[in-house]
Image (tube, rainbow, N blue to C red):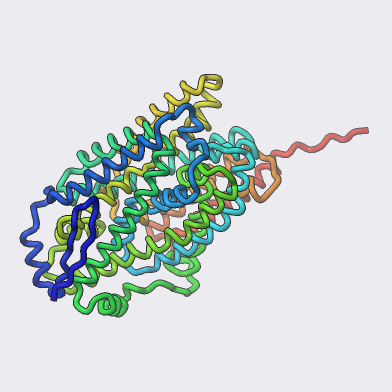
Amino acid sequence: MLGRFGFRIGGIGVCFGFQSEGRDIIQSVATQPVAGSLGGLDALFVGGAVALLFVISYVFGRREENTDDFFLGGRRVPWIVACLSFVATEISALALVGMPHTAYTENWRWFQFLIGLALARLIVAFLFIPAFYKYDCTSIYEFLGHRFGRATQYTGSIYFLVTRLIASGVRLYATCMAVGLILGWPLGLTLAMFTVVSVVFIAFGGIKALVWTGAYQAVFFIVSGVLVAVFLVGHIDGGLASALDAAGRAGRLSTFNFAWNLNDANTFWAGVIGGLFTGLVSFGADQEMVQRLLTVKTRKSSQRTILATIVTVLPVYWLYLLIGTLLYVFYGRHPELPLPTELKTIFPHFARTILPAGLKGLVLASIVLASVDSPLNSLTTSFVRDIYRPLICKNATERHYLLVSRIGVVVFGLILAAIAMACEPVQNILGFAFQILALTGGPMLGVFLLGLLTRRKVNLANVPAMLISTALCTVLLFLIQRKTLDLGWTWLIVLGAAATMGLSGLFSLLNRQPRRRTR
């Protein structure tokens, strides 16, 4: 049997056939174009998607008169647009490539982690966001300056710059790996292309271009993901019910593990608590994510924005986990089909060798768009507002700071490309990115929680507390990787935050001067 469905984009009809027999798929693989070639429809989709990106950047990103426009869009962005942009930034190419790989090789226990991320949004909405609007923050590390002092602000900003550069380098590598595999390009060439596109796009349009194109990207991710899932279901005998039954019997649908075991990062407790603290870091102490929330006019609009992401992002994560499960069943029933040398490339490998013209272009365009929503603007925001303006050049004009911001986009773009190139040996790209966050995220979260939950006015005590906590988390992660320490890595953020808060309190007590007696 052959089922068909179709849709229209820009007046062009697109139709996909769903064969119920694996024999037709194998034959289609034999007739696929060689790696590196795209059909005309594929090229049209990719070229059109990127062209529309620049159109949106021009329409919404022009007339950047000062750094307030460049960094916050004048706080005139509609909340629903900020919501979709937040979703696109959170998903990124890392999830588009990493989630199918995780579901293919393991199971659905990452969903426990996602529950923790949802709970973190509630805390950020009612604890973090009011404080950022109270102090009228452009960079969220300005909050640390108001609460504690410049030393804590500088340290928080440097932590963000280092963490975000490494984590985003991994994300950029995931994108270039996938695109290079589909096109047959070497990693260096793909990196060069993405770096140029991202730098030009963001240096011109600023945060307004990022937010509006982020909304467009989120819709693109959802549409292409649904079409790929439908395509896979149509090519598995027995459809979705049969696929889920086979995956369930193989343990690939295992979602919850309620065992109480601190040594296992895949239990419900480790996943939810780890997701909660990771979410607090990502959504409350990370300039890249929070900056989207600060582009709307009021505190209430910002709170509405992040709460709405709960019901918009979780289905997207679920969709790409489902794609990984369907890929497991599909290849399991067709062992004669070639697998990639490295399973981390399973989704782009499938797109290159199996997907028909048109749908392959949609997947490629999704991955391309996911990479362009880069952290270059947030990195530059933190550098200019937290370091350059207060430390290097205090009384320059807005035109000068705007020029420095655009130069910063270029410099950070080059640094990201270098880091991405160095990430080639990484196997589990999704887990690696979160483990990097665990090293510095806990200490950074700890100092934010000190500012939000206490009235303590310490400053210099925070700096050694953060540094010692980071060193502690690094040693623990090393021992976990060497299997010397039996502890789930998801607990590192919790330990880092607790250690920072405790050490800061201890150092402030030790440094307290005794009161002089007065007669």
Measured as percent of width and height from the top left, residue 189 is found at: 20, 39
Q: Is residue 298 left or right of residue 81?
A: right
**In which quadrant will I find the C terminus?**
top right
Judged from this view, the residue extending furthest toward the top is 396
| Residue in the foreground of this view, choosing between 34 and 460 | 34
Total numbered labels placed on residues in the image: 0
Q: Is residue 156 above or below residue 262?
A: above
Residue 33 placed where, x, y %? 8, 54
Residue drawn at (18%, 68%) of the image: 4
Determine if residue 350 is in view. yes
- The location of residue 290, given as percent across then percent down, is 50, 45
Q: Quadrant of the N terminus?
A: bottom left
Vertical placement of 27 versus 124: above or below? below
Is residue 319 rendered to the left or right of residue 24? right
Q: Is residue 140 depicted above or below 304 in this figure?
A: above
Where residue 128 appears, as percent x and y from the top left, is 59, 49
Front residue (pair 281, 136): 136
Q: Quadrant of residue 447?
A: top right
Depth check: give the residue in front, 294 or 451: 294
Dividing the picture into quarters, in which one does residue 336 lie? Answer: bottom left
For the point 17% across and 47% down, the residue is 43
